[in-house]
Amino acid sequence: MVGKVSERVLAREGLERTDNGMKQTSWPDVPPINQKNYYTDYMKRDDQILSLRLQAEANRDRLVQNAKDRDRALNNTNGDVTLPVDDLQGEDGGPSSSYMDPSKIIVIHPGSQNLRLGFASDALPKTIPMVLATKYPQTESEMYEALPRRKFEERGMDQQHGEEWSKKYQKACNDLKVDMRQNKRKVLPNSKDLVVNFNRRTEPEIISQHNDPLQVEWTDVSTLEDGGSESAVFIGHQAQRVPDDSNPKFKLWRPIQNGWLNENEYPTQAHLFNDLETLLDRAFRWELGLKKSTEWKQYSCVIIIPDLYDKKYVEQLLHLCIEWFEFSRVAFIQESMAATFGAGYTQACVVDCGAQKTSIACVEDGLCIEDSRINLKFGGWDVTETFIKMMLYDNFPYQEINLRRRYDFLLAEELKIKYCTLSQANISVQNYDFHLRAPNQPTRKYMFKCYDEVILAPMGFYDPSIFDNSHKLDKRRHLIDRSYNAYDVDMPDDPTSAAQLAILAHIQPSVTQTTIPASSFTGAPGEMGMATPSKERSNPFNFLGHTNNASATPGTSKAPSPAPDAGVSTPVPAPYIFGASSRDLNASPAPSARNGGTPAPNGSFLLPTTSFDNNPTSNQPLQRTAKDLATERDSVLPVAPLDIAIMTSIQNAAKGDEKKVRELLGSIMVVGGGAKIPHFAPFLEERLRARRPDLQDKILVSRSAREMDEQVVVWKGASVFAKLATNDSWVTGGEYKVLGSRCVYHKVLWQY
């Protein structure tokens, strides 16, 4: 009989493991994540981003090569020669001066009317009209309605130009008379009658060709370099001087209009992009002397883009420069930043008056303040058209003028440059003359009189309703869709700003309403209620308390408030619009756009037809998608008086800081060809002082520094930017081939 084994022995030999330290399983033990101390360095180091890693490697290779070259030079000279520091390394460890040769950098500034380009080492750019002519069955004057638009079959001037416009013109004339009398200026009561009667009786004088020393050299279409092939084109001044009655016929194409790619006149997207590429290609070859495209790989390129740009436009320019032209590097700079570089300002409110758009942006420490950007769709071209329209109303002797015809357009530009002014001291009934030079016709000399048309046309900057804005949005987004977020295909990604949305809200308040009252769908009586703010969206600052309403509630915290309960309509502060009435401000706030794109709450908006409780009779507010908001904003033409737009931009840049408002009002810089109208800056200064009489002594409007031409200040600033030794914004061909347009996000100096 076996003896009894104690429980201690059984536990030690069979149940209790005492012989080894083996684990229960070979799988590794994963401890749970401690949320309080959770940390990762994913995408937080520069070496994890391809663009920055390639740039660091290039700088390191360059330093190694410089060291080798230095040692080789010292060995060859036995240490007797000291190499200059500039040949070894740039300032702050940047690339060497040979690598940043300014004569190898091309600076391009495309615009609606002119293209300015040149090398960074040039003192001034070459300016060519942004137009090209190709063979076509019809000319533009045969295809489109005559400009200025009028009804030729009507007899009276009021009927020809429209009753509404005629009333606006008469009102502007009367207001100008009142203003001139207040300023103690002499106003003759029959000035208009003198002008109308003289112009009605004037007949042209025929001048034979041999007596006209200023004959225009029209382009000879028989000198096509391609032997008359269909691909032959003329660009710039040659295109503008192609006769309208040429054989074969040519049509003028303008790839950029109103600051956008021209989708109205082009039938296909491929045609538009091909013309843009052809225009730049011919400009490089004919204007810059780069005949061989094999040499272009040695050159870099700096492109100036608008402050409020379309990303598809930027990406297309990058694609052209890298893939088609094969430049080694490409960099982008915004117009307002380039203007401050060119003028040498560190802080300024830049007002850029172009041919067909006027942009406003505040710049601080060399960077554009995103919420201050405004883009208005009028400019010097509108002044030209309105000036001719006003003179036609007053029986201008050349009644057949049509700005669609090339020689008439050149004549209208000449008349505007010669006679338009914003100085009341120059307003009087005066005799003028001009010569009409048309191809294959004798020169005709016209005498005419004008009175207040010379000042009322440029005063349209402060009353844009006098301009013809009816066709500027035709076929917008017809060929090129807006850009969308790479991670959310329904989220528009084009940049916007609080100031621009405030301008749009001033015109159409619903563009900033993220919700729609259910009563508008159910047919309930009553007005449309206040909009409900979306969750996780901070309310913009309300600056009315700093200007007109001293008793307004001061700005609150930036922290977003919790979302309101469903069905509760919460009043929210309105966007800041300087000079807007209470009716205009009864809208939901313009959302902030500091991230460079259209702001949106977490996730996505609901469709307008969706109800919170699926009850069609409910009074719950209905939310709109971000795409719907972007579509409505695209349907609104941004136009506003220039002085109001400047004040709106400055207030959105200052964010309630009165000190910054005073600083920006004292550093307003006017650039662009539209600002070359005599007395433009003093007139703008007077208007701004009338808006803010409490800051009269602080407001200062200046032209470009050092008496530089306003048209080339932006290009000059970009050339200065291109020559900076420490510039991290270059996009190389290798980066573009790997990342595509995504490399722009890591390269540009602003929040793309």
Image (cartoon, rainbow, N blue to C red):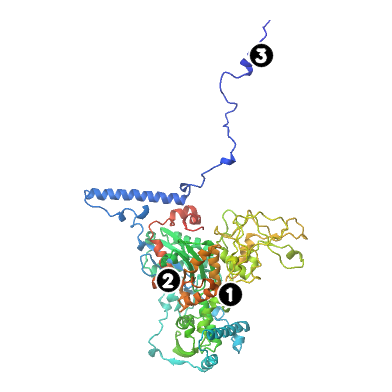
Q: Write down the residue under mark 3.
A: 7
In the image, what residue occupies the spot 57% across and 72% down? 640
Q: Circle 2 sits on which residue?
A: 704
Mark 2 vs mark 1, foreground winner is: 2
Give the farthest residue toward the right. 617
Q: Earlier in the sequence, mark 2 or mark 3?
A: 3
Q: Is residue 496 above or below residue 197?
A: above
Front residue of 586 and 168:
586
The extreme top residue here reads 1
C-alpha separation, residue under disc 2 versus residue under disc 3: 101 Å
Residue sitting nearer the eye, 99 or 559? 559
Crowding around mark 2 (Cα neighbors within 10 Å: few <14, some 14 to 19, many 20+) is many
How far apart marks 1 and 3 lie (CA) works out to: 101 Å
Whichever of labels 2 and 1 marks the residue nearer the N terminus, that label is 1
Mark 1 neighbour density, 10 Å: few (under 14) some (14–19) many (20 or more)? few
Amino acid beneath label 1: His
* C-alpha separation, residue under disc 2 versus residue under disc 1: 33 Å
Where does residue 547 sit, x and y in percent of width and height? 58, 68
Q: Is residue 635 visible?
A: no
Front-most of residues 236 and 706? 706
Q: Which mark is residue 108?
A: none
Q: Residue at x 34, y 55 (%)?
A: 96
In the structure shown, which secondary structural element does the residue marked by tag 1 occupy? loop
The amino acid type, in three-letter code, at marker 3 is: Glu
Mark nearer the N terminus (1 vs 3): 3
Q: What amino acid type should be assigned to the residue bearing mark 2?
A: Ser
**Which residue in the protein does label 1 denote?**
471
Residue 99 percent coordinates (x, y): 35, 57
Q: Are marks 2 and 1 in contact (CB under 8 Å)?
A: no
